[in-house]
Image (cartoon, rainbow, N blue to C red):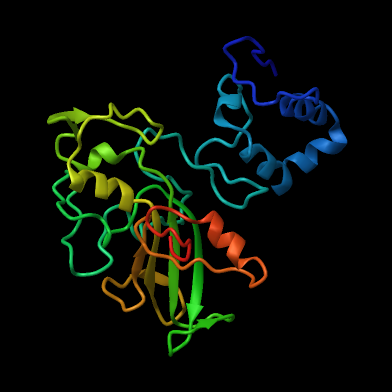
Amino acid sequence: MTFPYDDDYYEGNESNNERFEQVLKRALANPSRRGILKGGLGLAALMAVPASSWATESLALPSAGAASQTLGFSATAKSLADQVMVPEGYVVKVLHATGDPIDQTVPAYSNVGAETDDWSHRIGDHHDGMEIFYIDAKGVYSTTATNRAVLVVNHESSADAHFFNAKGQTSNGMTGKKFTQFGDWDLGQRPGVEVLKEINQHGFSIVELALDDKGSVTGYKVGAPLNRRITPMTVAQVHGPAAHLADIQLFMQTRYDPTGVRT
């Protein structure tokens, strides 16, 4: 294998340690280790390598449709389709997506920027970390699996907020703008509804899941009592150990609450 160590090559290793590619090349040259790398541990390590590190490499992967002796399922074919590709016999289903309502106060997501609400009753954008919590018949958290559960998802970014408006973002009366979350706003005056959308698409969504008799997820329940959004606009009480609470609240003082009791 050859690797282009030139100025245009993405270099993530700024230490004096060997690059992962060098370690992998040496391991593959050792017959006693080659078999280990074909197993799950090797696959997990390879999956952690940034895509840019693979850009010029030719890796010996199973051809599409060929069953892998290690993985136990057929490889997926290469595809340019804008969708998740899975092996034969597997199914992908979207549970909820950006803009989907959590209750009946807002209409279904238009996907053309027609929404005029502030996004506080919709699923946020850029799904990130998530956790499932089982609950009992009284709606109390359960440490064991039950036939009720809520899904909590962190919404991470406003990088695609221009899609939330029919003509892109607006600044100083000009539409068609495309601001990212990295501070490239032109500092012009902006419509309040656009700003609220961009604020409230961050945070957390909490929805109750619909489960079948076997405990498999079939969807989520729009309007369930436990559904809610937590956004940057959500009021939170500032708590902490009694011995340190005053210092914690001192640190949290803002114009919103000079006492630091709420944020």
Can residue 186 be spotted in the picture? yes
Tell me residue 101's x, y (percent): 25, 62
Compared to residue 40, the image places residue 178 above or below, namely above
Image height check: is 1 above or below 69?
A: above
Tell me which corner region of the image, top left, top right, bottom left or bottom right, holds residue 183: top left
Q: Quadrant of residue 123?
A: bottom left
Q: Whole-percent x and y of residue 166?
A: 14, 39
The spot of residue 222 in percent (x, y) is 27, 71
Residue found at the far top of this picture: 6
Closer to the camera, 49 or 86?
49
- In the displayed structure, does residue 119 sit left or right of residue 213? left
Q: Quadrant of the N terminus?
A: top right
Which quarter of the figure has residue 92? bottom left
Residue 61 x/y as whole percent: 60, 34
Tell me the residue at 46%/62% (across/down): 259
Say which of 13 and 76 sits in front: 13
- 84 left or right of 51 in image: left
Q: Residue at x 87, y 37 (%)?
A: 32
Q: Nearer the viewer, residue 77 or 259?
A: 259
Residue at image coords 34%, 39%:
82
